[in-house]
Amino acid sequence: MLKKYYSSCRLVAMLLLGATLSTSLTACGEQEKAPEPTLYERMGKVDGISKLVDNFMANVVAECASPNSVLLRSHTAFLADVSAGNDARRLAFRNNLIDQLGQISGGPLVYRGKNMVAAHIGMKITNAEFDAVAAELTKAMNTQQIKPADQEQLLGLLGAMRGDVVGK
């Protein structure tokens, strides 16, 4: 009888050990498969996106100052306001763009600005201007050393807004 008791105890112990090992191995497997970082995280979170936006804005200003500027027509009013000392407009645009990129890239930021149609109404943005903005953003992403696959992903997300921006 004592022998049966020890056999039962050993069987229970082995079952418990097996269950523990199985749970441990499953947990280890789950730990190895951490979720992929979001585009927001890969771009450097809010600090990286803020630097990206600052570089992008500097690129647009430089493009507007070039002799064959594609963007000068659509950015003249904005540049005139900022040159006249309206830094609030520049900061509002900067912060809205940071929030927008932070939201569409999977981060916790929330864009609270105008929708794209309302923001661009009356500007009559052309496809060439939209593409020139994308080119200046690409230059900024290259400066930030954002990986090409991440650049493509961000440009794809923004490209989906083309219909809300062009021709309005």
Image (spheres, rainbow, N blue to C red):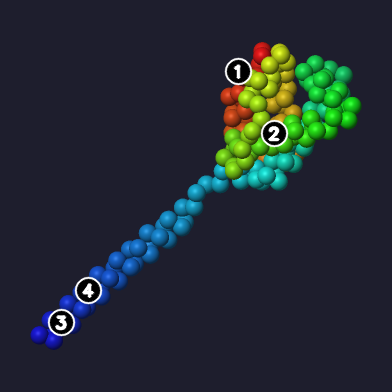
The residue most toward the right is: 84
| Sequence-wise first label, 1 or 3 | 3
Label 3 SS: helix
> Along the polypeptide, which appears first: circle 1 or circle 4?
4
On the image, numbered disc 3 is attached to which residue? 5
Crowding near the residue tagged with mark 3, few <14, some 14–19, many ≥20 C-alpha atoms within 10 Å = few
Res 114 quadrant in image: top right
Q: Label 1 is placed on what type of residue?
A: Gly
Left/right of residue 75 with respect to residue 46 in the rendered view: right
Residue 39 drawn at (x, y percent): 59, 41
Q: Count neighbours of disc 4 (C-alpha within 10 A) and say few if under 14, some if 14 to 19, many if 20 or more.
A: few
Tag nearer the camera, 1 or 2: 2
Q: Earlier in the sequence, mark 1 or mark 2?
A: 2
Q: Is residue 133 above or below residue 5?
A: above
Image quadrant occupied by the N terminus: bottom left
Name the image quarter holding residue 40: top right
Circles 3 and 4: CB distance less than 8 Å? Answer: no
Percent x, y for residue 50?
A: 72, 41
Mark-to-mark CA distance, 3 and 4: 11 Å
Tell which residue pokes out farthest to the bottom in this image.
2
- Looking at the rendered image, the disc whose residue lies closer to the viewer, 1 or 4, is 1
**Residue 158 placement (x, y as % from top left):** 62, 28
Quarter of the figure that contains the C terminus: top right
* Callout 4 secondary element: helix
Residue bearing the label numbered 2: 96
Secondary structure type for disc 1: helix
Dot 4 amino acid type: Val
Q: Which comes sooner in the sequence, label 2 or label 4?
A: 4
Q: Residues within 10 Å of mark 1 (few under 14, many from 20)?
A: few
Residue at 81% of width from left, 24% of height from top? 78
Mark 1 or mark 3, which is nearer to you? 1
| Residue 145 in view | no
